[in-house]
Image (spheres, rainbow, N blue to C red):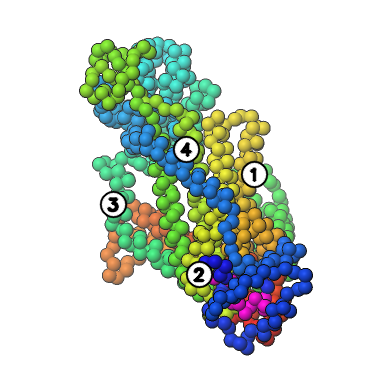
Amino acid sequence: MKGNQIYPSAPPQELYYAARPPPYSWSPSPPPAQTIPTRPPLETSYKEGEEYEEVQPEPQKIARFRVRPDKKRKRHNPQLYTKRGCTDVFCCFLFLLFTAGWVVVAAIGVMWGDPERLLTPTDSFGRRCGTMRPNSYNYTTRPYLLYFDITKCISYATALGGCQTSQVCVEKCPSEYFSYLQLQSVSPAEFQSKVYSNLYCADNVDKSTITSFPVLRQLVQSKQCISYTVNSAPVLGRCIPQAIIGAADKVNDLQKTNISLDVLRNMFGDDGGMIPQDYQIKGSQVVVGAVVDGETSVLTKMVHDLSKSWWQVLTLIISAGVLAFVWTVIMRLLGSLMIWTSILVLMLGLLGGCGYSWLKWNALVKQGAVDDFSFQPMFSVYFEMPTTWLVVAIILSVMALIFVFILLFVRKQISIAVALIEESSRAIGNMMSTLLFPLFPFALHILVFALWGTITIWVSSSGQENCRRVPYPGALVTNTSSRCDCALSYQDTTCVFVTITKDEDIVFWLQVYNLFAFFWMTCFVAALGDIALAGAFASHYWALDKSKDLPSFPVLRALGRAIRYNMGSLAFGSLIIAIIKIIRVLLEYFEEKFGKSENAIIKNIFLALKCCFWCMEVFFRFLTKNAYIMMAIYGRGFFTSAKDSFFLLSRNIRRTVVVNQVAGLLLFIGKAMITIGMGVVAFFFFSGQWVVEGIPRVDLYYYFVPIVIVVIGSYFIADLFFDVYEMAVDTTFICFLEDSEQNDGSAEKPFFMSRRLQEILGKSNDSTVHPK
């Protein structure tokens, strides 16, 4: 709106004198005359001693003035500002400046990077496996890349600074388990044989010079030769440990041979951690199950299955979306029944288990059964002892007793939670656009992820080619060799490619900046989606007449207000979450980079720090989400909104806990039912056990592939729908708390809550004003 005109979220002009809290929506047509109290004269509507600013209205336009807050009651009685302004402007400029810095990082990556270096397997010197470069190297017979220690490749250190281990191009991947410690006590002939057949070293290492174990150990410790090998298979040009989990025949073969890294460690030692354990290898596999089967790989068969079943998969995922929508309608109609039924089932389960345990204990005591809690090979034996059932009975009895007391004390809060859920369903039903809005932030999330991934690839592949001049073709490069332009190395036989050089520290901090930008952007997009939905649902709650006072396009209006006035506050809130996230990543990075310390104190410090920052992230997510809701209602800055929402919920802590738990239970039931249901349908259909007339049967190599995709897609779609529902419940709850604290049901301060909520609280409006 322009000038000082009242913002669309303001209430009908006639209600300024009937209620102090924010009705939040504006209708061009006033409510019926009989429902609006008579407007008192202007001079008698203000308290004596208070200052007010009044602007004369333009002809045939609504009056423009500002309702100022009562400073003494501001903390516990926030009032509506009809005129909004930009909040946290500094954070908005900081966000834009940081985004410009992200563009600079991307430009540096494009300037110095080459994604081909990552897409094509490349050794530690930047030479591409399976290719050749005239006058420099010929790796056409060495197409596979071997990592000296693959356990260092799957960690945060890899994401930020690359794979922290040496890499060489090889003709074929290792086919057996080997540790260099096996060679410390073998004959010279066997030593040389094993060196040539099992040992992999950098190209500058001449294996003929490795004549003793001390020489070999020095090369291993200097990272010039590999310390161990495992049975591997080529995957995308990389040698990856063979998949042993999920392949029964391979597990049996390994058990028969009894050969593994753990066996080698027990036989020959690990030389101070140079040889990893089997669980570290299993935890570092990038691709599991990539085993060649004839001429067709598993991956190829999976792609074939998806190409044949894609439309059935898409149909089932769309069906999950329809079911999620239907579930929201069911929660509106049967939410109360579902909640109380769940509580009743849980109560009956506790009482039934309690009674059965006491009866079982009594029967065993009468039979003269004895207790013997020494080690028993069969676990079921413990359930033939009376003490076991006594412990179970006591635990269930205590749980049932606690549950009964909880029901007695929070029965009213549960009724409020059910009513709020039904009111949220009503809001969604009146504003169906809220169910489609999540597609907008989802598209932005995909865009941010694509930008981050692209920049990560370019920055990771950055580096400068280093070429040296040699006196004649085939001569070795020495420290005194002069530099030459690598562009000439393809024609000039004396200009030889040596390696790719880059500043690892610069690359690391560029990746940290890029990752932090990713966190900040994703949190900002999520915040933008939250405040848009919160504004829409708040406009529904604060509309006295839901059929007339709702603004048109409520989600778009709320989104527009957020972009115009609250960009800085959204950037501020998302910045807090992003900082915590990057700290957690750096903790993982330094723990991985410097190795798992054997010092118990250091281990506990890292564990405590990670736990602490995880708790901080959970808390600030909760705080910022409620701050966005208050921001959508009042348009205040982040600190004020966070403070008001925090103290509002603190003053109503019992209601807050109950509503969150009840709503969470109901939403969990919905997600689980939809995901499990679609998974069962997909299983029976793709396995051929359920034949639908008119739909041809799909013959697949692995029917679990489309089933997994259907389950993941169904959960994702259900999560999108229920995230909207969760925001509706949270917004309605905060509006309800504001309404119940600020109003008393009088003509001057009417309640905006539904009549059922008024009945639960034992309150009601005067006959002059009734919310609809």
Residue 10 lies within the magenta run: yes
Q: Amino acid at mark 1?
A: Cys
| Mark pair 1, 3: CA separation | 46 Å
Q: Please tell me which residue lies in front, 400 or 392.
A: 400
Give the mark, 4 or 3, whose residue is nearer the N terminus: 3
Q: Amino acid at mark 4?
A: Gln
Q: Residue furthest bottom?
A: 34
Q: Disc 3 designates what residue?
A: 304
Judged from the image, the secondary structure of the residue bearing numbered disc 2 is helix
Q: Are marks 1 and 2 in contact (CB under 8 Å)?
A: no
Q: Position of residue 328 (x, y in %)?
A: 50, 70
Residue at the image point whose x is 48% and y is 19% from the top: 221
Q: Position of residue 260 (x, y in %)?
A: 45, 31
Badge 3 density bin: few <14, some 14–19, many ≥20, Cα 10 Å: some
Judged from the image, the secondary structure of the residue bearing numbered disc 3 is helix
Q: Is residue 754 visible?
A: no
Q: Is residue 261 left or right of residue 373?
A: left
Give the mark, 1 or 3, whose residue is nearer the N terminus: 3
| Mark pair 4, 3: CA separation | 36 Å
Q: Are marks 1 and 3 in contact (CB under 8 Å)?
A: no
Instruction: Determine which of the numbered discs, if any, sits on residue 511 in the image.
Output: 4
Q: Are marks 4 and 2 in contact (CB under 8 Å)?
A: no
Badge 1 density bin: few <14, some 14–19, many ≥20, Cα 10 Å: few
Quadrant position of residue 747: bottom right
Q: Disc 1 designates what residue?
A: 612
Residue at the image point whose x is 44% and y is 55% from the top: 444
Q: Please tell me which residue lies in front, 421 or 532.
A: 532
| Mark pair 1, 4: CA separation | 25 Å
